Image (cartoon, rainbow, N blue to C red):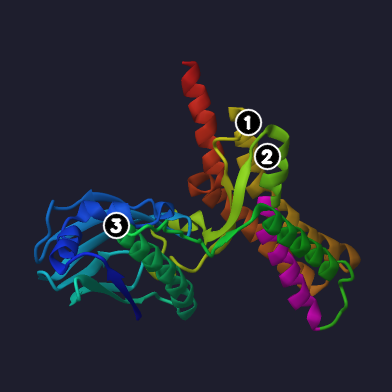
Amino acid sequence: MILTKTKIKTNVKELFKFFSKPKNFEQIYPKELQLKILKAPEELKNGDEITLLITLFGQRFRWKLRIKSFNPPKEIVYEALVSPFKSWIHTLKLSPLDENTLLEDKIDFSTYFPISNIFSKFLIKRVLNYKNEALRKYFGEPLQPLYKDSFRIGLFQGTFISCIMVLLALILNFPLPFNTSLDILFALISFFLLWFFTHDLAHLAVGAIVGVKFRYYFLGLSNIILIKGFPEALKFMPMVLGLKVDKILSRASKKGLASMYLSGPLASIFIPFLVPLWILFKDSSNLSGLITLILSLFNLTFSLYFSPKVGCIAKALRVISVKESSKR
């Protein structure tokens, strides 16, 4: 449960009137969320439904909210019928405070995994803080609401971390095989680090050659969750490192942009093969080499299935198709 309290310099009736109009939501939430109302009444009443789009952890989600309780001018309770969360109830409570209003936000939510609850709670608090500052500004206070995305990483910092992780992977793998019980652990760590961190480094390197500029790294949800039939219970689990393209400063051609997109999956498919190839070169019967070879082959097979559908290969194909259609 998350609870925030904020004093808003307006009376209860005016603030309740603001919240009773769903279109106003788009004015008070961070632009990074790209909140957009798709379907809603002009003014709310009990039992009404609101359909909206919102961006969380780099992915676009459709939400459907139902007004569970509508008690003017004291309380509105929103219950999520469709959302990326297992459960979601947001209670707005308004109370007179001198000539102002005390606004209480209480959010009861849960995801399918405890670690997802931790990430989500951190994000929700940041969003609520921004929303409350935006409300105070809307009602006349001289504020400039700021939203700090805790899952955003600077370009230099993200590149430095990625390079260190790749170097660590090579260090762990270089002396293998030890013919000890640590072989499998070190090999798996090395494989994972090469798979996880080479993807964006390849984007960055090829982007520098072809003229693609990037703004920052971010920790977000993998596009794997977009595959039809992906379990709802797992949608907050597959976190990956991503790069935000700077569309304004980029000067890449369509071909260059497609090459940049293709470089990521090619790197994360083939570079991890270095782990089993090195181990098996040193000892062709080593168990850790055989395990990581199977893992590499699975990664190759799955990536060639997944990426052309919703991953970076799909993005490259879309770029190419736009180029082809423009010639017609």
Which residue bears the numbered disc 2?
207
| Predominant SS of the magenta segment | helix
Q: Could you say which is closer to the camera, residue 89 or residue 262?
A: 89
Cα gap from disc 2 to disc 1, whole angstroms:
8 Å
Circle 1 sits in a helix, a strand or a loop, which is it?
Answer: loop
Task: Report which residue position mark 1 lands on.
Answer: 252
What amino acid is at disc 2? Gly
Please identify, in this view, whether the residue under mark 3 or under mark 2 is nearer the observer.
3
Q: Position of residue 274 (x, y in %)?
A: 79, 58
- Residue span colored magenta: 181-200
The number of callouts visible is 3
Please give the residue where the numbered disc 3 appears in the rendered image: 140
- The earlier-in-sequence mark between 3 and 2 is 3
On the image, which quarter does residue 176 sit in? Answer: bottom right
Q: Position of residue 116 (x, y in %)?
A: 46, 74
Circle 2 crowding by C-alpha within 10 Å: few under 14, some 14–19, many from 20:
many
**Which circle's residue, 1 or 3, is located before the other in the chain?**
3
C-alpha distance separating marks 1 and 3 = 44 Å
Residue at 46 percent across and 59 percent down: it is 146
Q: Is 189 colored magenta in this rendering?
A: yes
Res. 269 in view? no
User: Eyeballing the image, is 200 above or below 210?
Assistant: below
In the rendered structure, which amino acid carries the disc numbered 1? Ala
Circles 2 and 1, Cβ within 8 Å, touching? The answer is yes
Lateral position of residue 290 relative to residue 259, left or right = right
Q: Earlier in the sequence, mark 2 or mark 1?
A: 2
| Residue type, numbered disc 3 | Gly
Q: Disc number at residue 200?
A: none
Say whether residue 323 is left or right of residue 120.
right
